[in-house]
Image (cartoon, grey):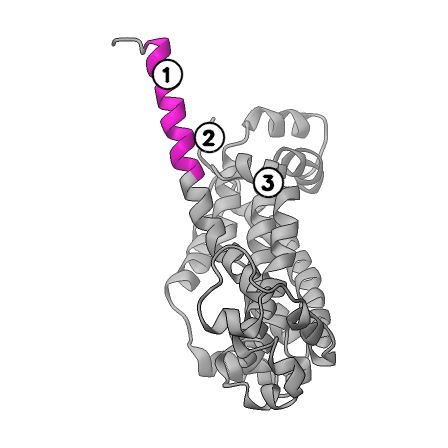
Amino acid sequence: MVEPTAWGRQTFLIVNYACMLIVALLCLFPIVHVFAVSLSSSSAAATGQVFLSPVDVTTKAYQYVLDKEQFWKAITVSVYRVVMGCSLQMILLVLIAYPLSKEARTFSFRTAYAWIFYITMLFSGGLIPAYMTVKETGILNTIWALVLPNAVAVYSVILLLNFFRGLPKALEESAFIDGAGHFTIMWRIYLPLSKPALATLLLFSIVGQWNAWFDGIIYMNRPELYPLQSYLQTLIVDSNINQMMELSDESMQELSDRTLKSAQIFIGALPVLLVYPFLQKFFMKGIVLGSVKE
């Protein structure tokens, strides 16, 4: 095989970085555009003058959104949902993935349990049975209606158990020889070695919990119980006639349905954008979950 020259490697790096930069800019474009629209005047947004920078800069849209009591109630519900939902999901994820990562001779019913979880990814009871289950368990119109139905993420379980199976078996065998039990091994060996995988799955969980909107509309009968995304969905989909009627004639010159929606969308996406940089180093390592085998 012919070894690439230094010039060839440098050319490849330049082309590779250029392509990645273009992809990154394409991903950032919608966010920057929405942010620019949210800071622009009503006339500039309506006439299509806004591209990547605000026109006639104004913060009236953010002031209007942040002054609404319902918006802060929805934020509180979403924060509770993310904290409770992600905590429960990660605990169950580890407790399920660890035994399923064992071989059949160690855990006799491993294959049967694995198939039970896998089938739930292929088949679902449907919306009506799910709603009836939530209603009959008495958790309708409570935070548990948003947390419990999504407590077990089967896809994440499969990813994590494959990651566990890729860890060196010698570490577990050495711990058994020293008298450690399964919980000790899981807590002191598996979890510290799985930080990249757990951080990646935690990021998936945070994004999933924060962006979910449909279950909030289905399981919550009162708008004040909506999480943020459900609340924003009702505002974005509806015509917002009542919302626009609340604005004074002076505000109508600087606000419009489009600028208000853009401000709401950007605020809704902002928490995830702030969390991602702190998990990025783990995400880059954990993105190859289960690819390394002993």
Crowding near the residue tagged with mark 2, few <14, some 14–19, many ≥20 C-alpha atoms within 10 Å: few
Q: Is residue 59 left or right of residue 291?
A: right
Residue name at image x 44 percent, y 37 percent: 21
User: Foreground mark, 1 or 2?
Assistant: 1
Task: Choose top left, top right, bottom left or bottom right for residue 212.
Answer: bottom right
Q: Horizontal and vertical percent for residue 224?
A: 68, 83
Cα distance in 3D space between marks 2 and 3: 20 Å
Taking depth in this image into account, of 54 and 279 the one nearest to the observer is 54
Q: Compare marks 3 and 1 and give the one earlier in the sequence.
A: 1
Q: Residues within 10 Å of mark 3 (few under 14, many from 20)?
A: some
Q: Which residue is mark 2?
A: 292
Q: Secondary structure at mark 3?
A: helix
Residue 140 belongs to the span the image colors magenta: no
> Which residues make up the magenta segment?
5-21
The quadrant holding residue 56 is: bottom right
Residue 294 showing in the rendered view: yes
User: Sequence-wise, which precedes: disc 1 or disc 2?
Assistant: 1
List the residue tagged with mark 3: 280
In 3D space, how far apart are the residues under numbered discs 1 and 2 (Cα atoms)?
Answer: 26 Å
Circle 1 — which element?
Answer: helix
- Mark 1 highlights which residue? 9
Kind of residue at disc 3: Gln
